[in-house]
Amino acid sequence: MADLSPTVRQRELGLRLRELRTAKNLTVEMVAKELLCSPTKISRAETGVRRATLRDVRDLCRIYEVDSETSAELMELARDAYKPGWWNKYDDLKVTPLIGMEQSATAITSFGMYFFPALLQSADYARAVVKGVAPKIAEKILDQRVEARMERQRLLQGPTPPKYRVLLDEAVLRRHIGGPVVMRANSTVFSRSYGKKRRRSRSSLTRSGPTAPATATSPIWNSAAPSSQISCSSRPWSASYT
């Protein structure tokens, strides 16, 4: 997974552009008139919802009368924002680029009511969850979804992992997903990722497979980057962000 997330660079660029605009006492409408575009385009670029083009950044630097050094920094951020994220190679996932905020998080708080969070799932556990929700899923697509979850977990294995807090419903530990062998293996992943002090062995499992709840897990990412808190409602087939 890349060290620099294009999503983070995009949002950082937007924040800096907004700061430059407000420092000049310019409204979004005034800037849009200069660029011959809609105010929505300017607003979406500043909030990081859309990527600003290199031409737009160049023109905004002219409008805001920034020096050559600052202009070069902003142009570099714009270039970085267009670099592909790790998730782009998984065509089926159709995930929002906001997933890129996860790798820059300094703290993650996750609430799980039905499954272990994706960052604490073994490959077999993840496969059982996805297969249980979508039993007719193509094997190639299933492999991609599991691989993507394993890719995300590299975040916790790095030299400076984020502070990770997890609140689980007791049923998560007892729900029978993938069989006893899979559950024991996933407990090992949980213990390794979350620390030995949190380790606890459980052998009594509820005999019910994976279901399709409205919200399976809800991680909150805190970051030192712009827009420092992102909330995600994650389901086995999709996710939404606020």
Image (tube, rainbow, N blue to C red):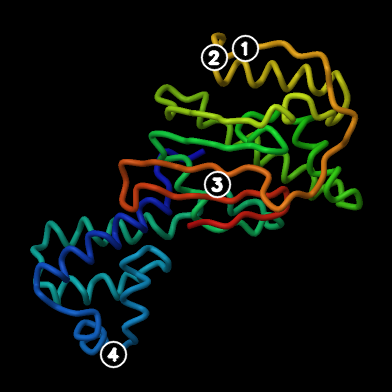
Q: Which residue is mark 3?
A: 86
The amino acid beneath tag 2 is: Gly
Name which of mark 1 and mark 3 comes first in the sequence.
3
The amino acid beneath tag 3 is: Trp
Q: How many marks?
A: 4
C-alpha span from label 1 to label 3: 31 Å
Above or below for 76 versus 168: below
Q: Which residue is mark 4?
A: 36
Above or below for 132 versus 171: below
Residue at 68% x, 30% y is: 121
Q: Which residue is mark 1?
A: 199
- As helix, strand or loop, the secondary structure at mark 1 comes to loop
C-alpha span from label 4 to label 1: 59 Å
> 84 left or right of 63?
right
Looking at the rendered image, the disc whose residue lies closer to the viewer, 4 or 1, is: 1
Name which of mark 4 and mark 2 comes first in the sequence.
4
> 97 left or right of 227?
right
| Image x and y of residue 154, in percent | 55, 30
- The label on residue 195 is 2
C-alpha span from label 2 to label 3: 27 Å
